[in-house]
């Protein structure tokens, strides 16, 4: 299902990157780089998310009370990172879970809610932390378990964005809501190929409903499909539409995967958010892109279901960002 978003603008955004991400190809686009040296991994994620929100408010000279409501989520059980971050912020909160596709779902839902005349602006946020995600979804790194070459590397990122009805240089023009797709894939060490069918379902649905093709966009991005999932999507786009030279994946842009030892590429909710709200935003403002389509993907599973030999249901949500005329 695709929704047209009218007069919804990106007022501002802020991306706080971890130390490794701050040494990658996009280091010059981030607002801040944080070493994340708190007492535990989960507290470090709370810190970088809090910093991303605080820096955004400071950048726009706003108080939290000036924000109508917040929408976001991350990977932690029961969205504890979000809850612990907002326990000190007196603002209405809508917590969402869409795994690594959280940022596009959050932006899309915010765009729809801004149609309400009583809502003036919405804070959209997400985060991820490599070590807390490893502890929850696999095994703590201290166990020393071997990594498969198909595995991705969860990014350490805190990201925030402010959407409003007030005209600005960048706007959100379209939101395609994804469906849960499960093709029976069971390899929990290969989320990229597991999520590729969901990405294609949403991309093809978006193109059909908007009567567009890949050529209508300056850049098309998927959210963390790994180098393996990326190849599946690229091949399918080329078979259906011809050239796909304007297609890339956020997990492959965030790191130098050969030099930084991040296996098959980056993942985690922060990955797509970081690329969209820092690199893509600044490139658009500089005139390199006019219209960008981001289709972020998420694997909707937990360790219990994987240990019970269940397959991997996945989802993808897409958002279009354009330079406002």
Image (cartoon, rainbow, N blue to C red):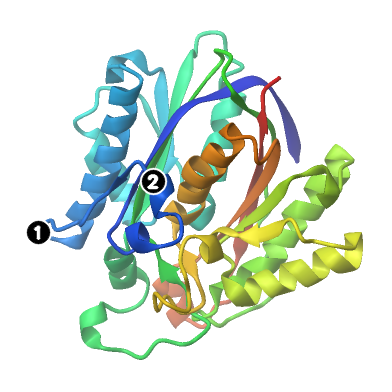
The picture places residue 189, in percent across and down from the top left corner, at 49, 81
Q: Are marks 1 and 2 in contact (CB under 8 Å)?
A: no
> Residue beneath label 1, please?
39
Residue in front for this viewpoint, 8 or 77: 8
Estimate the spatial distance between the alpha carbons at disc 1 and disc 2, rounded to whole Å.
24 Å
The picture places residue 190, in percent across and down from the top left corner, at 55, 79
> Residue at 48% of width from left, 13% of height from top?
120
Q: Quadrant of residue 20?
A: bottom left
SS label for mark 1: loop
The picture places residue 198, in percent across and down from the top left corner, at 69, 61
> Residue at 24% of width from left, 51% of height from top?
34
> Residue beneath label 2, please?
30
> Residue at 30% of width from left, 79% of height from top?
139
Crowding at mark 2 (Cα within 10 Å: few <14, some 14-19, many 20+):
many
Residue at far left of view: 39
The picture places residue 44, in percent across and down from the top left corner, at 20, 54
Q: Is residue 40 above or below residue 274?
A: below
């Amino acid at each position: 299902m695709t929704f047209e978003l009218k007069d919804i603008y990106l007022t501002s955004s802020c991306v706080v990157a971890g130390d490794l991400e701050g040494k990658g190809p996009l280091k010059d686009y981030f607002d801040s780089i944080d070493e994340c040296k708190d007492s535990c991994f989960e507290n470090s994620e709370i810190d970088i998310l809090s910093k991303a929100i605080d820096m955004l408010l400071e950048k726009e000279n706003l108080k939290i009370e000036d924000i109508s409501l917040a929408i976001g989520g991350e990977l932690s059980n029961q969205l504890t990172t979000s809850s612990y971050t907002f326990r000190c912020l007196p603002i209405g909160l809508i917590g969402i879970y869409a795994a690594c596709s959280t940022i596009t779902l959050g932006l899309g839902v915010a765009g729809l809610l801004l149609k309400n005349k009583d809502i003036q602006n919405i804070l959209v946020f997400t985060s991820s932390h490599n070590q807390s995600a490893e502890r929850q979804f696999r095994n703590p790194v201290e166990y020393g378990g071997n990594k498969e070459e198909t595995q991705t590397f969860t990014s350490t990122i805190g990201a925030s964005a402010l959407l409003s009805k007030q005209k600005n240089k960048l706007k959100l023009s379209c939101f395609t809501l994804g469906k849960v797709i499960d093709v029976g894939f069971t390899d929990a060490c290969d989320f990229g190929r597991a999520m590729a069918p969901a990405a294609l379902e949403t991309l093809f649905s978006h193109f059909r409903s908007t009567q567009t093709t890949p050529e209508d966009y300056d850049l098309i991005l998927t959210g963390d499909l790994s180098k393996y999932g990326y190849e599946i999507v690229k091949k399918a786009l080329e078979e259906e539409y011809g050239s796909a030279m304007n297609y890339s994946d956020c997990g492959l842009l965030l790191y130098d995967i050969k030099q930084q030892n991040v296996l098959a590429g980056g993942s985690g909710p922060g990955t797509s958010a970081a690329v969209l709200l820092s690199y893509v935003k600044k490139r658009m403002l500089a005139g390199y892109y006019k219209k960008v389509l981001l289709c972020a993907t998420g694997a909707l599973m937990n360790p219990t279901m994987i240990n019970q030999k269940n397959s991997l249901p996945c989802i993808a949500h897409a958002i279009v960002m354009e330079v406002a005329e």
